[in-house]
Amino acid sequence: MPANALPNDIDTLKRMLVSRDETIAKLLAEIARLKRWQYGRSSERMSELMNQLQLALGDLPKVADEQVAPIVASADADATAGRLRDNVTALRRTPRAFPTHLPRETIVHAPTNCGCPHCGGQLRVLGEDISETLDYVPGYFKVHRHVRPRLACRACSHIAQAPAPSRPITRGMADAGLLAQVVVAKYADHTPLYRQEHIYRRAGVQLERATLAAWVRETSRLLEPLSDALGRYVRQADKIHTDDTPVPVLDPGRGKTRTGRLWTYVRDDRPAGSRAPPAVWYQYSPDRKSERPQKHLQGFSGILQADAYSGYGALYRAGQIVEAGCWAHARRKFYDLFKLEQSPTAQEALARIGALYAIERDIRGCAVPLRQSVRQRQAAPLLTSLKAWLECILMKVSAKSELAKAIKYALGHWTALTRYCDDGRIEIDNNTAERSIRPLVIGRRNYLFAGSDGGGRSAAVIYSLIGTARLNDVEPYAYLRAVFERIADHPINQIDELLPWHLDLQNDTLPKAA
């Protein structure tokens, strides 16, 4: 503004100067915050960093549908379709040929009864059927040759043969170990399918990316009942930690992506001395509407520890779910201010909140009654003093300052933030849920987007099993291999037996049914 346009009134000039200083301070705070999000320690970054999360699992279009559609539209549709069926049949009859240099393990499936089941006569070898499946043992591939001798009875000519062994994917060439390797490499080691394709090619095995994507899609369908079982187990808890993160999803026809959400629900009461196995359950949704967590948590009654997202409000208003806040979010606002301005007030707030965390370190893993007793005796006076101090500071600072915003956040959610003091089951923060989001953040630079909503749901299923295995100190590859070896023939009403804390991987056995 030119000097001749400025007012001559001193009070007006002072107000303009104060307003300008507040604007400059706000912009500087935003710049410093963005720099810390990009270069600072990951433990201090805000959840908005999740906006860069990118996943790459999409349902590939079915090739057969794309090929058949134009054929049917042609004038000689019937003849062309007939030739197509003949070609498909011929391809199915062509035996798969795996590279000869791969080690092979022959597994003979002979009839259990040496005599003819019809007349008791002696069986003679008539021939055999041989099929091969490709397996993966960490470090190398190998081929399983499944040999099924056909035996004929000399007396009545009856032919006996052992049934073909079941496979994780019907008529698929991949064994359990290879499927587990592909899934774990993508979702635990963050290796996209196109990179896996190149890795396997160097080992002399040609596996197209479309084939790998189809295996991922089929394995997610196999694992979906297990993911549902995890969801039921998580919702049986007294307390659940939750959070969500954006997921870019392809939007065909628009040439861009839209934003879906990946929600996490964690049951982990080990800090409160519980021996119940921890579990994490992910759910995908195409948006962030409040109806999504309502649907996910249908039937749940207890404590929900989360951030201050307004979409959870409907859950709290229903009365079945109690809100618990997160002191890590409140602390982070003071931390950002201290890093920017070296504010002594922000430093004092950090020291007071740090004293609350020091109490939690001493009682971590203790029983619920002891945690509650210690908090009421030690933390309650500190919280009372902290609230009075924040209210006093708020009256002395500008209402538009960053410090005022940080104080208003804490005071505005004070009931939820202090509820942990009266209930030993509740944690001081929601870092349990934020840790479950971390694997998605680590892989964000390797993935571009989810190909569809179906791809997002597949990712949620597989992440649930891998995340739960890790929480229970179970190696994900060994666990998923054991599941793929069993799940095709496992009774659906006993699916809980395949959860990570039930499988005995060391002895390779399942627990006996009660």
Image (cartoon, helix red, strand yellow):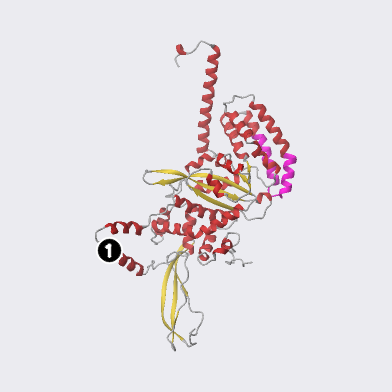
The residue positioned farthest toward the front in the image shown: 318
Answer above or below: position of 385 versus 105: above
Please state, as top left, top right, bottom left or bottom right, where the C terminus lies in the image: bottom right
At mark 1, the secondary structure is helix
Where is 378 relative to 502, above or below?
Answer: above
Residue 178 inside the magenta-drawn segment: no
Q: Is residue 54 left or right of residue 81?
A: right
The stretch in magenta equals 350-378
Which quadrant of the rendered structure holds the N terminus? Answer: top left
Q: Nearer the viewer, residue 480 or 321?
A: 321
Is residue 357 a member of the stretch shown in magenta? Answer: yes
At 57% from the left edge and 55% from the top edge, which residue is drawn? 230
Expressed as whole percent of the image width and height from the top left, the position of residue 205 reads 40, 62
**Quarter-wise, where is residue 335 in the image?**
top right
Instruction: Give the image location of residue 324, x and y in percent.
Output: 63, 42
Q: Is residue 342 visible?
A: no
Residue type at mark 1: give it.
Asp
Q: Residues within 10 Å of mark 1 (few under 14, many from 20)?
A: few
Q: Is residue 209 visible?
A: yes
Q: Residue 84: horizontal and vertical position, in percent?
A: 30, 64
- Majority secondary structure of magenta residues: helix
Residue occupied by mark 1: 78
